[in-house]
Image (cartoon, rainbow, N blue to C red):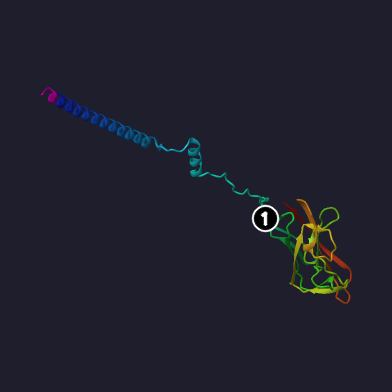
């Protein structure tokens, strides 16, 4: 009987120990789960994700996902400034009178730009009641009816672009300016002197451009008091005018 009681107590003790061991395991498992949850929460709040990569691997991965901004490579403008002196909006008009003749010179601007062609208009008007004989070169389009010269630098003159390279036949002729009639001559001048052969196109020439400053031009009209058959002595109507380069 005593042996039976001892055996039952032993069995009860073993069952009690087994129950305690299971509870300990459950507590350990619960503790590990709580620790894992706490770590995950901390990682979520700090933006850090646990990884098994080494610090070097983590650094390499991070660089590989970054977007690198390149320095600005906008081109630098190399265009030269095209600004220039603003010329006054003033016309230039001069006139001279003699023996009933009126000689006029006109340009749209009193100031011209250095290195740029400009237009000059000259005219002669017969205000008398009779015809007047005048002289000119027999070669057409040489601007010989009213001769215009603009003194440049040194012995050079402004270039009459419309007659550059043209040859004169050196045949003088007499023409008639009728009573009340006006003859007009439009000319283009380049403020510079070509350095090459006159037979070479002006566009292919090297040009010695005149510097800014004031220059003087002269317009001359040659006429006669007689007739074509007997013109008599030549007379001159002369007009000086300024050309200002800026």
The residues colored magenta run: 1-5
Seen at 82% across and 74% down, the residue is 175
Seen at 87% across and 68% down, the residue is 234
Q: Which residue is mark 1?
A: 90
- Give the overall secondary structure of the magenta segment: helix
Quadrant holding the N terminus? top left
Percent across and percent down for residue 209 are: 78, 55
Does the magenta-highlighted stretch encompass residue 4?
A: yes
Question: Vertically, is 61 above or below 175?
Answer: above
Q: Nearer the viewer, residue 24 or 173?
A: 24
Percent across and percent down for residue 42 are: 36, 34
Does the magenta-highlighted stretch encompass residue 87?
A: no
Q: Nearer the viewer, residue 244 or 1?
A: 1
Q: Is there any visible trace of residue 160 in the rendered image? A: no
Percent across and percent down for residue 96 are: 77, 61
Q: Quadrant of residue 102?
A: bottom right
Q: Nearer the viewer, residue 230 or 59?
A: 59
The furthest residue to the top? 2
Seen at 14% across and 27% down, the residue is 8
Give the structural element (helix, strand or loop) at label 1: loop
Q: Quadrant of residue 228?
A: bottom right
């Amino acid at each position: 009987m005593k042996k039976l009681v001892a055996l039952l107590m032993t069995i009860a003790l073993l069952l009690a120990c087994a129950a305690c061991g299971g509870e300990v395991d459950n507590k350990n498992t619960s503790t590990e789960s709580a620790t894992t949850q706490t770590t995950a929460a901390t990682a979520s709040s700090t933006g850090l994700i646990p990884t098994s990569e080494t610090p070097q691997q983590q650094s390499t991965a991070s660089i590989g996902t970054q977007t690198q901004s390149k320095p600005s490579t906008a081109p630098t403008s190399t265009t030269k400034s095209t600004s220039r002196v603003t010329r006054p909006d003033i016309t230039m008009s001069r006139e001279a009178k003699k023996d009933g003749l009126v000689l006029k010179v006109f340009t749209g601007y009193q100031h011209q730009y250095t290195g740029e062609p400009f237009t000059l208009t000259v005219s002669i008007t017969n205000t008398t009641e009779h015809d007047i004989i005048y002289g000119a070169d027999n070669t057409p389009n040489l601007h010989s009816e009213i001769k215009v010269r603009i003194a440049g630098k040194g012995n050079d003159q402004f270039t009459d672009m419309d007659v550059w390279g043209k040859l004169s036949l050196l045949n003088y002729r007499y023409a008639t300016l009728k009573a009340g009639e006006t003859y007009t001559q439009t000319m283009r001048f380049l403020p510079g002197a070509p350095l090459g052969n006159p037979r070479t196109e002006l566009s292919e020439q090297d040009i010695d451009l005149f510097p800014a400053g004031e220059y003087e031009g002269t317009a001359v009209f040659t006429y006669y008091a007689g007739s074509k058959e007997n013109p008599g002595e030549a007379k001159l109507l002369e007009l000086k005018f300024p050309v200002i380069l800026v």
